[in-house]
Image (cartoon, helix red, strand yellow):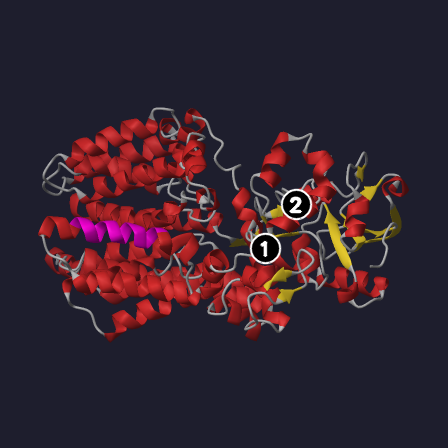
Amino acid sequence: MRQLADILCNKLLQNKNIWLWGAVSLLVLYLSPLFIFGGNLQFLVFDNLDSNVVWFKTLAESGKIFAANDAVIPNIMNGLPRSCYGSEFNIILWLYYFFTPLQAYIINESIIHAVAFVSMYIFLDRYLFKNDSAYKYIYVNAGALYFAILPFWPSGGLSIPIMPLVTYVLLRIEEGRDSWRSWLLLALLPLYSDFVLVYFFYFFLAGIYFLRKSIITRRFNRRLLFALVFTVALFLISDYRLVAQMFFENGFVSNRTEYYSLINKSFLDAYRSSLLEFLDGVPHAMGVQVGLLLPLALFTLLLLPVKKKLSTRDSLIFASLFIVSYFAGVWDIVLKQIYTLPLIMIILLALLMQNRSRLLPALLLAQVFLAFWFGFSFYEGWRAVFELFPGMEMFNFSRFFFMTEMLWAVIAAVVIKEILIKLNFSVFMIAVIVIVQFCISLNASFFTTKISLYQLPFNKYYAKKQFSEIEEYIGKPKESYRVVSLGIEPAVAQYNGFYTLDGYMVNYPLAYKHEFRKIIGKYIDSDKYYKDLFDGWGSKAYLFDNGVQYAYYNEFAIKSMHNKVYNNLELNVSQVSKMGGQYLFSAQAIEDPQKYGLFFLKTFTDPDSLWSVSLYKVEQFEKN
């Protein structure tokens, strides 16, 4: 009877469909809030609601999607060239064209996470664990699910989610086992991925891999080389506007030529940034590893010397030691010490010198190296290099970190495999690990029902009804005047169709940056942080001023400031007037507005909005 039970149990464990449908069900559960709560969910603000959503919406509604590079789209920063908005060969843009912004956002998120699951599943199943036994579907699905429920940056599209599949395709091409589907994937990749932020760095590493293999094998793999050149060429063609702007349009000088504030960390601060990246990742590439996976992966290294499955007693001891250390907070203490990264690196190098089980140490060591690269990309010593090679400051060389999410998911699968083959009662332990990790990922999601740090509700953030009332009160065509926002991110006004002098753009004319600086120059010259933020970065042309806050942590932080009053402003309102600004939207009342050249009109509130908007007229405005 017991033998029959064991056979049935093994049959269930080897059943591909059970694990697949279990993983898919959890993925559907993860995505379900998007369809249940929609615009009432809390969404990521930085580099998302405050920027990318508005850029896509503005371009989609401009009627100038296919316009020439020098055609002006007037909505943001008093009008910017079409080239500043990116390529028309972008699927996210067309989602915003055919659907409402919220619908486009939800569709994009759903595609991202669904593709991430399929992408990682194929990579693990057909490549990394291709020759494993039928039990592989336990850790293949676990790794794919881990990857699929990571908090991917929405505006990156499929850049990271499809990376495992791209890797699989390139490896098949290298082996000469490609098909027309392989080349079709590479041909379509630029339409839903970002070259400048992600794939420039991915293909740089792929190029190093190609050179290394060529030297080792003394054989030039022409198919792989052609695949790399082919895909990069398509990326450059699809992003032809940026290429033309950078290399052929001499009249355009980008604000990025004045980048320097990022290269500002001392050696010790750069190391601390490396440690933080290793533990927590960065906002655009969060592996959510420190919550469970990283401690579990490091503890699993103890299993590598073990040649056969542990006894029931030893398995229970191993599991108990990890559970006790985990809940006692031992890992939280150990991982945050100043010596953590060097110690981990030494241990991993020692393990790699052995002849068995190198995959997990190699993957973890790669994460350590990427963490060091990230932290020291901002080391102040690089300034000497940038002085020798002008123009390099325009690039952010830290972005190899976009590879880390894929690597953490592979590490998750490898850890689950080690536990499965080395421990008794491992399936129960794996089930607990998956459930705990699922809860961790839910908590870290970029769409959630709970009030979260740096996330705000879509509907309340953009406050369409409230800003429609403001538009009706002003009573003039929105294209006939310009506005600025104080304490409210310009994206809110832009989303609602107002034409702004301020804004957040990663690439815009340097001359406009200098002109806008005259509005805020008095204040930022007295504050080193804001001076470096604007002069040495400048993507945010905001009304920075004394007591004005834009770093909104949550709804409560915004609501708490509404009863406060702005005083001692150092804004050059006459410069606002000279640039065409007629109205100012303020998050708080301004004390004695007349002395700044402002005339109070009305305060607008709405229970379905995050904002209390005080509307002011710029008195000095003179029509050109």
Q: Amino acid at mark 2?
A: His
Quadrant in which the C terminus appears: bottom right
Q: Which residue is mark 1?
A: 51
Check the image and name the residue furthest to the front: 250
Which percent across, then down, holds residue 304?
A: 16, 38
Q: Is residue 528 left or right of residue 177?
A: right
Q: Is residue 576 left or right of residue 156?
A: right
Q: Residue at x 9, y 40 (%)?
A: 307
Of the image marks 2 and 1, the number of the one nearer the N terminus: 1
Quadrant in which the N terminus appears: bottom left
From the viewer's side, name the closer residue of 329 and 607: 607
Q: Which mark is residue 514?
A: 2
From the viewer's side, name the closer residue of 204 and 558: 204
Chief secondary structure of the magenta span? helix
Q: Residues within 10 Å of mark 2 (few under 14, many from 20)?
A: some
Which percent across, then down, holds residue 27?
A: 40, 61
Res 328 → quadrant: top left
Which percent across, then down, holds residue 540?
A: 61, 47
Q: Secondary structure at mark 2?
A: helix
Instruction: Check if residue 209 falls in the magenta segment.
Output: yes
Q: Residue at x 36, y 28 (%)?
A: 330
Q: For the magenta stretch, what is the residue range?
A: 201-212
Reply above or below: 331 against 446. Answer: above
Between the residue at mark 2 and the residue at mark 1, the CA separation in whole angstroms equals 21 Å
Q: Secondary structure at mark 1?
A: loop
Instruction: Check if residue 356 falls in the magenta segment.
Output: no
Which percent across, then down, holds residue 336?
A: 40, 28
Q: Is residue 319 visible?
A: no
Q: Is residue 30 left or right of residue 562?
A: left
- Cβ–Cβ under 8 Å for marks 2 and 1: no
Q: Is residue 260 visible?
A: yes
